[in-house]
Image (cartoon, rainbow, N blue to C red):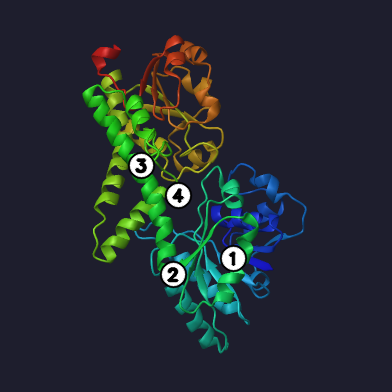
Amino acid sequence: MQIAVIGLGYVGLVTAVCMARLGQRVVGLDTDAGKLAALESGEPPFYEPGLSGELNQETGRLTFTGDPAVAIREADVVLICVGTPSAPSGEADLRAVMAAAATIAEQLTRPTVIALRSTVPVGTTEKVEAFLNDRLQIRGEDIAVPVLANPEFLRTGRALDDFLRPSRVVIGRTQRATDQDVGALSTLYRPLNAPILVMDAASAELVKNAANTYLATRISFVNELAALCEATGASVESVIDGIASDPRIGSDYFRPGIGYGGSCLPKDVRSLIAMGEEHGQEMVLAKAVDAVNNAQPGRLAGHMAEALGELSGLRVALLGLAFKPDTDDIRDSPALKLAHELREQGAEVVGCDPQATGRVAEAEPWIQIAPSALEAARGADALVLTTDWPAYVTSDFATLAAVMRRPFIFDARNALDPARAVAAGLRYQSVGGMAPLAALGA
């Protein structure tokens, strides 16, 4: 089959290269000429492990264009993969989705299956389908086109593996969609040998938002639990071991830290809250999850002030600026939220990251960028592990301590070996193990 992928951002580009790897002929469509030029030269517009290698496979099955007619008119399946960022109200901004639908309606001349992979609120698939078919009628095209919900479940840093080895594929059908339409979309995913779950479109749309909100709930719960451990003197690591040993609970997304970030979890939690408000259902738990997460950077900054004294005039080095390892994505990055908290208290902030420094320099030019952890630590009053890149987790702490002005390290990801840090001469603190100033010394 020939596949058109509309939108070559994170989801769209990963989808395009993986569909080509599965043997489909894929045409990727985007309006960004600079992005298209980079892709034509084999350069992805963002960092994702393995993506550059896949992009440079000489199979001839993957091409890119800015011409909608080239991408859409010969396509058997069109996949909408445009962004749906949060509006100020928390609702998903659907302007790019509707623009993609309008573009499709301008080009279709024969029956084609449309699938919506963008993360959208309940009811969007039906809305897009009605809009698209109305536009076709206005054009005088005597065809009826189904739109199916087909949410993605790609983790940043593991996206290719998640696409090629999925835990499930979800397809949501509208009343217009036939078994043949569902079968055409299912055919694309059958080589993956994953369960294909077919349901109504509204349920499929909710699956993605609900799944991410549940993962965010686990993170916020363990962070709130860590705060209670700090107040009571309990060991958060021991408590987690006891809880996670229950097979009904497990340890995934269950490590305390500075909070979640990125383009998915924060947006999807807020979207679920907004959907609830739209339908008269208050999402009490989701609101609490969001509130706990938003408070984490401030809580950490408060603990740092307790340990270090007045933060004004101090130099704080952040090890990691991306929202998680194996990406250059800084959207809703907890590291940058902490940087703002520290700046408000008068601290000088320096940061390093293996991939994200270019994006940070553009978005937050006031943050000093260091080329390495060693240079970030030089003259610093405190180090903070804000992104658990393996290179930072395994740092030579003795070397870092030797160039610091004061040897404090705050493990905002609970990923370091405390014994190694202490043996290197650092005063170590983790989330859930924050001691008062008297215990640390100044």
Residue drawn at x 77%, y 52% is: 58
Spatial CA distance of label 3 from label 4 is: 18 Å
How dense is the environment of label 2, judged by Cα within 10 Å: few (below 14), some, or many (20 and up)? some
Q: In terms of sequence position, does the residue under pointer 1 or pointer 3 come before the other?
A: 1
Task: Label 2, secondary structure: give it.
Answer: strand
Q: Which mark is residue 297?
A: none
Task: Label 4, secondary structure: give it.
Answer: loop
**Rendered-image quadrant of the N terminus:** bottom right
Q: Amino acid at mark 1?
A: Ser
Q: Is residue 299 visible?
A: no
Whole-percent x and y of residue 298? 29, 34
Give yes or no for contact between labels 4 and 1 (Cβ–Cβ under 8 Å).
no
Closer to the camera, 241 or 420? 241
Give yes or no for contact between labels 1 and 2 (Cβ–Cβ under 8 Å).
no
Whole-percent x and y of residue 235? 31, 23
Q: Which mark is residue 186?
A: 1
Q: In terms of sequence position, does the residue under pointer 3 or pointer 2 come before the other?
A: 2
Lateral position of residue 184 relative to residue 248, left or right: right
Residue marked by disc 2 = 200
Spatial CA distance of label 4 from label 1 is: 27 Å
Q: Amino acid at mark 3?
A: Arg
Q: Amino acid at mark 4?
A: Ser
Whole-percent x and y of residue 39? 67, 53
Q: In terms of sequence position, does the residue under pointer 4 or pointer 2 come before the other?
A: 2
Residue marked by disc 4 = 263
Residue marked by disc 3 = 218
